Amino acid sequence: MYKVAVVGVTGAVGQEILRVLERRKFPVSELVPLASERSAGTEVEFAGKKHKVRKLEAGAFAGVQIAFFSAGATRSREFIPIARKAGAVVVDNSSAFRMDLQVPLVVPEVNGDLLDAKPGLIANPNCSAAILAVALAPLHRIAGLESVVVATYQSASGAGARAMEELDRQVRDYAGGKEPQAEVFPHVLAFNLFSHNSPVGSDGYNEEETKMVEETRKIFALPTLKMVPTCVRVPVPRAHSEAVVARFNRPVSAREARDILGKAPGVRVVDEPEKNLFPMPRHASGELDVLVGRIRSVEGDPNSLAFFVSGDQLLKGAAWNAVQIAEELARRGGLPV
């Protein structure tokens, strides 16, 4: 049994971590729910009990064996060293340490072997990169990944609970004849889509796209992997989707890919052309697995495959991947006792 801290417990990912810990029956002896001073004193529910949220401060990590951080990069940089000094193993959902060469960036189905080293800090990847990696990994193992072109269809949940609420409010306003207003996002999301709302760099790629490239390369240990991502925000409450064209070092047929993906951990193949049934965010929402379908060859290039992916951003893209890391650490003896 473990004393578990959840930092950012009142946010969308923090709340989902609590649900996944319950869902997976993770052995929690004591929960330490932590958040900003603004949320301190409120209550969260876990394992059928109410727990008072505590203020995030240095003394909060005494005796904690594992800490999940989901409070943003600034808080992670400030408090993770404190949690580590107190003896906690940390799984961080922020971008703070993802590209640190000393910190493993882990998707358990892809590079879970990195946990054999019993690291004290593990970074959770960007949601889009994690979902993509689960679908690519089984094919990479048998054919060797050479390049990826990917367009994402990213839900409101990727921007947190307030963004989900804003989309819901905009839809209701639109239905009621009112002009929808944007506050969280730079543009109205309801019945619309736009380039991902992160700053665009001098190379023309926004931060989300850059993260996908850098993190996918690190996860697969392929520093020169060629990638062209286009990240788009779409009016979907929850779960991200991705249209992928991947090129490999040898030919891979659509049939072979279906067989491989059908046996892969963390993947569920949804590929029924006769019913026009393929991965959808509606079906991926609430699911731990990543849905993969529309698997097809690329004309004139037997080494390339096209396919479509949907995965729950709050689960495989965040909370479930974090808890899965903790489960793997526990199984490999990587948590304090």
Image: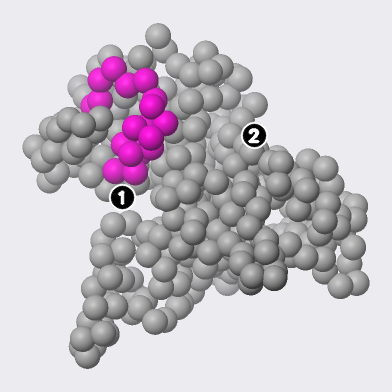
Amino acid type at circle 2 is: Asn
The residue carrying mark 1 is 12
Q: Looking at the picture, does residue 168 appear above or below residue 141? A: below
Residue 78 place in picture, x, y as percent:
31, 35
- Distance between the Cα atoms at labels 2 and 1? 26 Å
Q: Nearer the viewer, residue 78 or 151?
A: 151
The residue carrying mark 2 is 111
Q: Quadrant of the C terminus?
A: top left
Q: Relative to 112, is 295 on the left or the right?
A: right
Q: Relative to 255, is 1 on the left or the right?
A: left
Q: Relative to 98, is 23 on the left or the right?
A: left
Q: Residues within 10 Å of mark 2 (few under 14, many from 20)?
A: some
Q: Secondary structure at mark 1?
A: helix
The residue depicted at 58 percent of the width and 34 percent of the height is 108
Residue 260 place in picture, x, y as percent:
77, 46
Residue 21 occupies which quadrant of the picture? top left
Q: Residues within 10 Å of mark 1 (few under 14, many from 20)?
A: many
Q: Is residue 269 visible?
A: yes
Q: Is residue 223 visible?
A: no
Of all residues shown, which one is farthest toward the front? 274
User: Which mark sits nearer the N-terminus, 2 or 1?
Assistant: 1
